[in-house]
Image (cartoon, rainbow, N blue to C red):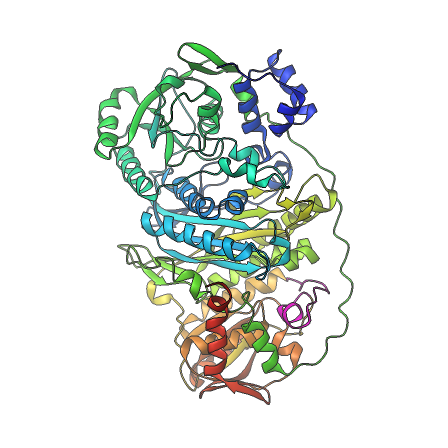
Amino acid sequence: MQEPHITDELIASHGLSPDEYASILEIIGRAPTFTELGIFSAMWNEHCSYKSSKKWLRTLPTSGPQVICGPGENAGVVDIGDGQAVVFKMESHNHPSYIEPYQGAATGVGGILRDVFTMGARPIAAMNALSFGEPGHPKTRQLVHGVVEGVGGYGNAFGVPTVGGEVRFDPAYNGNCLVNAFAAGLADADKIFYSAASGIGMPVVYLGAKTGRDGVGGATMASAEFDDTIEEKRPTVQVGDPFTEKRLMEATLELMATGAVISIQDMGAAGLTCSAVEMGDKGGLGVRLDLEKVPVREEAMTAYEMMLSESQERMLMVLRPELEAEAKAVFDKWDLDFAIVGETIAEDRFLIQLNGEIKADLPLSKLASTAPEYDRPWVETPAAEPLGDVPGIDPIDGLKALLASPNYASKSWVFEQYDTMVMADSARTPGLGAGIIRVHGTDKALAFTSDVTPRYVKANPVEGGKQAVAEAYRNLCATGAKPLATTDNLNFGNPEKPEIMGQFVCAIKGIGAAVDALDMPIVSGNVSLYNETDGTAILPTPTIGAVGLIEHADDIIGCDVRDGHVALLIGETTGHLGQSALLAEVFGRADGDAPAVDLDVEKRNGEFIRDNRHLITACTDLSDGGLALAAFEMAEAAEVGVWIDSGDTPFLFGEDQGRYLVACNFDKAEALMIAAGQAGVPIQSVGKFTGETVWLGQSSAPLAELSATFRTTFPDTFA
């Protein structure tokens, strides 16, 4: 087949700028072949090279005594004691999910699971953070159904419990939904597998499913804005098979036990190209591939297609040659492909051959570590105007408005489509704060949460970035867990616009300050830029996934609210209504500044909750909707009414940070107030849980009536 002639249009369609193409000519001293152009395009696109974000990602705190492996590998690894480690990461599959919702979301789940078991960990938990356009938008319903079914279809069939996540709606996501997938697994701390190749002349082995044409160019597509050609991008979305992935996981973990693996890498974005280049570059080696040996499921595939395919359920491994027979036997048993497709070489070359014909011959190190890096111009987001007057509102009417919004109504319609109990170690499932998984065979448990408030980040990127981490910290502390570490999924618009780059830079500054102050280093993550359609950007959405450790299952703070329990508010309340849920849902406003985050206060209050967990029967952090929504959700889950003694709008709906709502009996409440006084932590009794009515000051409504709105809003909107 004749390769296309390299034209300016072809270069541009591969996401390469004229300057980048000039750099390619300088590096290789000639015009690239079509396959070489595709390889450079894959390795130098935003999704793989982080060329706009690397400068700022380096500023994030990534180390600590608990960190075994930070960013740069398939997933982060954190010590949880007793020779065990938790392995976790969050990644985006935004563009594919907008084009083909089911497969985009499904393969996002599949990809993040592979990142975890490629490190030698068995997945134990999944989460997903989903952002959609306004509920009434013509495309939103289709996206919600497709994405939720894709997440459930893949995760349920694979057999991993979905323990948490988020679902939000805003017009800013009308042309660009976000699908951020998280997975965590358990491994022996001394049996972690890495991706750096070592040894010259070692076999490079292709593992898993066959290669097809699905996903060709997917990484490049994920690094571009959408426009009216969006339908043409549908073939760049991968197709997933969770049952093959389940077999691949079992085969991979069994293979690792044989001692045959020198290094191993998931074939994710940019498929065979990215996995081979990363393994070689990290090991300071070259790689030769013979593509006629690659297992394929379509006829007459070209070198370009094989190198850029993003077919799912595939891995690349460097093998100890003396254990080839044992390794192949494992994959034969699981009915998966095992093919030696090349070898490591001493020269700095990425040599691609097909039936003896050289299709690419490039300096491997130039593809990865010397990819372009930009210090893009950026401007700070202007300071928010002071919040104007907020009209008075009957507090029950305000609460009803929140409960009638898909943003704050129960998401049970979503998570009931997910298997939350498979593996039988789930101690807390979605809908009650952070999810909790028992560490099988031990007394320990792990808590998982995913958090960000995009409207805060848009108004004030530094405080919004801090708040995303702080809310994750609070969600973990509210379960009794000690926060360990975080993963970030940084979703923004076009970084070539200084105002968007400014959002990114300042959010990173806030995130960095918070993870440092709260001892929650970033150990893995993902950057997703160019989330724009026809020039309209999403809300800046730096999602924070966090993991915490509960040393003993008896230390879990429960959700057991009983009639007669006292309601205690921990933390200082000033009644901050800027950028609040009440402002958005009742008044259609998004003005004022984001709430300030005092990281010293966050740490002090979180430690107070953990240190006094024996006095706390139930606990939730306060975030969107403030005290009113938190009190209702605790009451609704327990099927008992609640009386909050104040009817003041800022007190009830303000979104001041660093706060928790606690329920316990009178004796424990008294002891908790004494402990808070000694620790210098603000605490006040704000009411009690009792009866069958929700009282906010002098305004009331039957709990059953409010619960019906809370439970039916989402299915009435989308079912």
Main secondary structure found in the magenta portion: loop
Residue 464 visible at all: yes
Residue at 67% across, 41% down:
495
Q: Position of residue 195 (x, y in %)?
A: 42, 31
Residue at 51% across, 66% down:
717
Q: Which residues are magenta?
A: 579-597
State left or right for residue 246 relative to residue 78.
Answer: left
Q: Position of residue 201 (x, y in %)?
A: 37, 15
Q: Quadrant of residue 563?
A: bottom left
Q: Quadrant of residue 422?
A: bottom left
Q: Position of residue 29 (x, y in %)?
A: 62, 11
Instruction: Using the image as rendered, state which of residue 349 and residue 174 is in the foreground.
Output: 174
Instruction: Give the quarter of the figure containing the C terminus.
Output: bottom left
Q: How many marks?
A: 0
Q: Is residue 142 magenta?
A: no
Q: Is residue 582 magenta?
A: yes
State left or right for residue 594 relative to residue 177.
Answer: right
In the depicted structure, whether residue 676 falls above or below residue 407: below
State left or right for residue 10 relative to residue 717.
Answer: right
Instruction: Using the image as rendered, state which of residue 64 and residue 133 is in the foreground.
Output: 133
Residue 63 visible at all: no
